[in-house]
Amino acid sequence: MARSRRNAELSLLLLAMALVAAYGAMVEANVLDTVTPGFWVPAATLTAVFLGMHLVIRFLAPFADPALLPAVALLNGLGVGFLRRLDLANAAPEERADLAIFAGIGGRQLAWTLISVVLAAGLLALMRDHRSISRYAYTLGLAGIVLVMLPAVLPASISEINGAKLWVRIGSFSIQPGEFAKLALLVFFAYYLVRKREVLSLASHRFLGIDFPRGRDLGPVLVVWVISLLVLVFEKDLGTSLLYFGMFVATVYIATERVSWLLIGLVLFFGGAYLAYVLGEAVGGPFANFYLRAEIWLDPFAEPYDDGYQLVQGLLALGSGGLFGAGPGGGQPLLLPEVQNDFIFAGIGEEIGLFGLSALLVIYLLIVERGLRAALAVRDSFGKLLAGGLAFTLALQVFVIVGGISKLIPLTGQTTPFLSAGGSSLMANWLLIAVLLRVSDAGRRPVDGAGGKVTRPSGPPEQLHGAPTEVIKP
């Protein structure tokens, strides 16, 4: 069974890389009016990298979900292909045909892909049992809070880009600590809620058929809510604030199965966001940036050549793409500010159209669904909360990005997972996928037919996770 899964993974991976190669050929045909003999080199390099990851999974996680790696590889490959398309458009016409494979932002993204995949493979090798990281839950939780708050306390010259304080820049090197903070915080959330879920599941009263928790149990949610508001105010980014608070509320819901926690979370977050908007209009100061973003969201065409320029250009790109798009390499993505980062989804959408964007969203949906399936299949509570939280986090990040460029919610500083340029996002999301692969491997590991016992690697004491050490056949 394990071999058939890995063979299916290999077949899907080769198909994904064939699509990436075809995309690269179409880009060159539209941008260069010809297809160079080396159009296949970037796709072949990516294929070699992902085949290496496939071999690591085959030996270290043989029962892992076979759809995760191909789906992520396709998104990553298309991201590299589009960034290389931007490099071709930026290069002088006489230099385009000879553009080096590691040149420009596309080349850097290819290098970051290699580093990210190596890190993911290393994590799989070190973490043979996902439950082992629960031993470091409090350390990771503290590290996550430090990483979240670090850009907020640094000078704007070091941490601020386009109005959002999300970075740490030292010379030409920059990193986004929040991308790694979400992984550390999720481990802590999962560990904490495994221990406290029975308390948080207690109901004090019932209203409209919904059981609401006791007032004394609202403490953890209120603490995370305050932290998320501090992120909103001092880091000036709605997406990051929504991501952290949404992660916690989602894991609380998974742990307790109480709809009331979702309702409380929604009321707290939107109430806090509205309060920040009102204070931004009345007081300004640290609330001014959020107020400005909300005003742009409400009416981007009020100042289409000034504050609303980026959102207006994104909407025009999506509109001009129509159903089928202008074709890979046929659009005008350079008219979009930050098209390689925040607005890469709009830039790609102009060229592949609504149908193509829908296909990309389906791929994201597949990854999230597979993550939730891993959460359902794994036998320990810590793994269920961890995998469920990771899957929801990826879904929420995609929602925040797509919602921002389509004017559903105010613009954020989040990057599109696996597509946008940037090493921090790419490394963090590949580490996320490595954890999902490890959890799915544990969940799909079959029962030992000889003794009727579940095959398990060694890990922390089972009383922490509420799962039996063995399953005896009837």
Image (tube, rainbow, N blue to C red):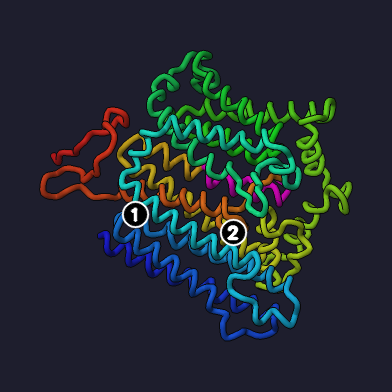
Q: Label for residue 64?
A: 1
Image vertical order of residue 346 relative to residue 159, above or below = below
Magenta segment includes 398: yes
Judged left or right of residue 82, residue 72 is left
Image vertical order of residue 109 relative to residue 257, above or below = below
Quarter-wise, where is residue 20 in the image? bottom right
Task: Label 1, secondary structure: give it.
Answer: loop
Q: Can residue 409 be seen in this view?
A: no
Residue visible at 61% across and 33% down in the picture: 149
Q: Give the range drawn in magenta.
A: 393-410
Residue visible at 58% across and 41% down in the picture: 178
The three-letter code of the residue at mark 2 reads Leu
Task: Label 2, secondary structure: give it.
Answer: loop
Q: Quadrant of the C terminus?
A: top left
Q: Earlier in the sequence, mark 1 or mark 2?
A: 1
Image vertical order of residue 415 relative to residue 340, above or below = above
Image vertical order of residue 290 relative to residue 345, above or below = above
Q: Mark 2 points at which residue?
A: 419
Which residue occupies the extreme front position in the image? 171
Q: Is residue 272 visible?
A: yes
Q: How crowded is mark 2: few (under 14 residues within 10 Å), some or many (20 or more)?
A: many
Q: Position of residue 307 (x, y in %)?
A: 84, 47
Q: Position of residue 330 (x, y in %)?
A: 71, 73
